[in-house]
Amino acid sequence: MSGSREAVIEVRGLVNRFGSQVVHDGLDLDVYRGEVLGVVGGSGTGKSVLLRTIVGLNRPQAGEIRVFGRDVLRASEAERREIEKRWGVLFQDGALFSSLTVLQNVEAPMREQLALPHSMMKALGELKISMVGLPPLACGKFPSELSGGMRKRAGLARALALDPEIVFLDEPTAGLDPIGAAAFDDLIGQLQKSLGLTVFMVTHDLDSLHAICDRIAVLAERKVLVTGSMADMLKVDHPWVHEYFHGPRARAAMA
Amino acid sequence: MNGASVTIRRDGEGAVLELAGRVVMGTLHLIEPGLRRAPSGVPVVIDLGGVAALDTGGAWRILELRRTLEAEGARVEIVGADPHEAELLDAVARSLPRAEGIEEPPRGLVPWIAGVGETIVDLGRTSIEILGFIGLVVARAGRTLVQPGRLRLTALVHHMQEVGFNAVPIVSLMAFLIGVVLAFQGSVQLRQFGAEVFVVNLIAISVLRELGILLTAIIVAGRSGSAFTAAIGSMKIREEVDAMRTLGLDPIEVLVLPRVFALILMLPVLGFIANVMGLVGGGLMSWIELGVSPGMFVTRLYETTDVWHLGVGFIKAPFFAFVIGVIGCYEGLKVEGSAESVGRLTTASVVLSIFSVIVIDAVFSVFFAEIGV
């Protein structure tokens, strides 16, 4: 089955160490085109570190990371810029530039990477903001004037500004109320389908895993312990995985 | 294929617009001229059969084209989209912003005058707030003096090291160089009158009375005042200050008083070090430049320099320290919302505290001149 699918991200033998603390040791992971991959793991198992390593914010001690078939750790500056145009990242609290309005935040990557006329950039920015479900009024607001959920949506609009092929989401539903979280899940699912996105999502939210993830990767013991669908996870008998997917919260999410 | 193209073909009554290639944000400028030539008033078919790639930007442009043509009364049909492209077109069409943008801020004379008025009112309000804050700090300081147990000793010592001990190298270097410059410039001027030996008076009075303490205060304002604002501002953003309030801790007592006390205790010490280093620098330069030996320098220093010159300098130190500390903390507590506001208020804090230090210095100069010290 996996032979026919194109892996857009391939991680091989990844080693991440901070001082004497080993976070990843020989971690392997594939992300296939068009899927929603949920990455779960206990606190401190290096989910966010993995995300940061793939997008190049953290340099690993060893290993190989291929994105779109190109080795990003050994790519030249120009090659990296090309690849960076093809992914978008949503950080945990949106990481919007606080000195810019929401619209300017969404326009920022376009301004940097494309030579578009100003009016078109504004129209596209407003379109992206409306696509993530924010009202037009939000365009002129500053990030500090938005609620947490709106900041995440605005962050997603910025991540989608260049129509990336891969979107990295770091705990997209953390800190949202259940209704807001479900709406955000829906939004990601919808955008994923209509834009044909590949989604790499670090999450703790069992509801999101259940609702939109095609595949789940469990980080434990410094590597990817298992990957597979929700049904596969339920059969794994590793104690942590069992606890995670059979705990009271998991049962509630699956009910 | 990396480009995009548009061909317009007449077809009986109407026209067919054939889009081909990668219709994405990066290539919109290539098809823009072609799209502008689209005939108006006749039925148009937009054929996406040759489109290799479509993104939201391309979809948006196609839908915009349809909207403008339909507004001119033409019938428009989009054909040849594969299922994925059709879905994208749908998704974009659903979320096209309906409301007309955001209203522009008003321009003209009246809003400008209103802006000036608001700034002045703000200025007045800020002055009153600072006055209130000073009162609050003084009240809390008074309570701490009555109940010394309330003073956070660890924090005080920590800040004393931060603002005092760690500033010794930069303050010493600064004062030493000021002494050197004064001696050098003074000797050049005084030599014209054959009064080189008065260079000692020049150095001693200007360093002890004014420069030593004033420049130290300016450096401390830049170094520690900004650090106070940035540190307290970051705590404010991360809601640490609010957390303190809910825990029954008084931010003034926990954050402001140790910093202000540390400055009041350490600024005179730094000023003293600056005085010594200024005299050393001046003495060294006089020796090199004018041949005034260190022994003679010290002798003339004893004979000609009244101890009040030193006193005048030191009386000012606690006032400078208090103002720098209070302004630094006040601006820090004013931080709200964004990281940018920390930067803005840190700048404001440094500018305001240096300005205040200079104003206070001027007031003291007039005062001491009047009472004849």
Image (cartoon, coloured by chain):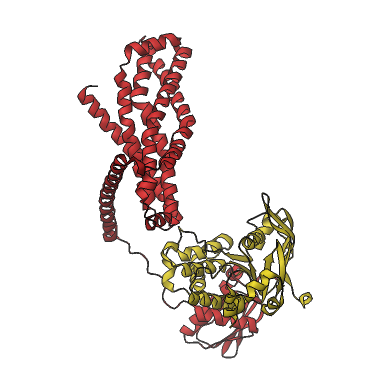
Chain colours: A yellow, B red
Q: Give coordinates of residue B211: x percent, y percent.
A: 37, 27
In this view, which residue lies farthest toward the left?
A: B370
Vertical placement of A102 versus B166: above or below? below
Question: Is residue A67 something that shows in the picture?
Answer: no
Q: Quadrant of the N terminus of chain B?
A: bottom right
Q: Position of residue A94 (x, y in %)?
A: 52, 64
Considering every residue shown, the one lying at the far bottom of the view is: B12
| A214 horizontally vs A91: left or right | right
Q: Name the foreground residue: A183 vs B8.
A: A183
Determine the image quadrant of residue B224.
top left
Residue at the far right in the pictured view: A3
In this picture, residue B159 sits left or right of residue A170: left
What is the count of numbered marks?
A: 0
Identity of the residue drawn at 68% across and 78% down: A234
Q: Could you tell me residue A29's position as x and y percent?
A: 72, 66
Residue B67 appearing in the image: yes
Q: Nearer the viewer, residue B114 or B143?
A: B143
Residue A238 or B342: which is nearer the viewer?
Answer: A238
A80 versus B274 height, above or below: below
**Camera-side residue of B185 and B227:** B227
- In the displayed structure, would residue A238 be above or below residue B201? below
Residue visible at 28% across and 41% down in the picture: B142
What is the x, y in percent for residue B332?
Answer: 39, 49
Residue positioned 38% across, 44% down in the render: B328
Looking at the rendered image, the quarter that the C terminus of chain B falls into is top left
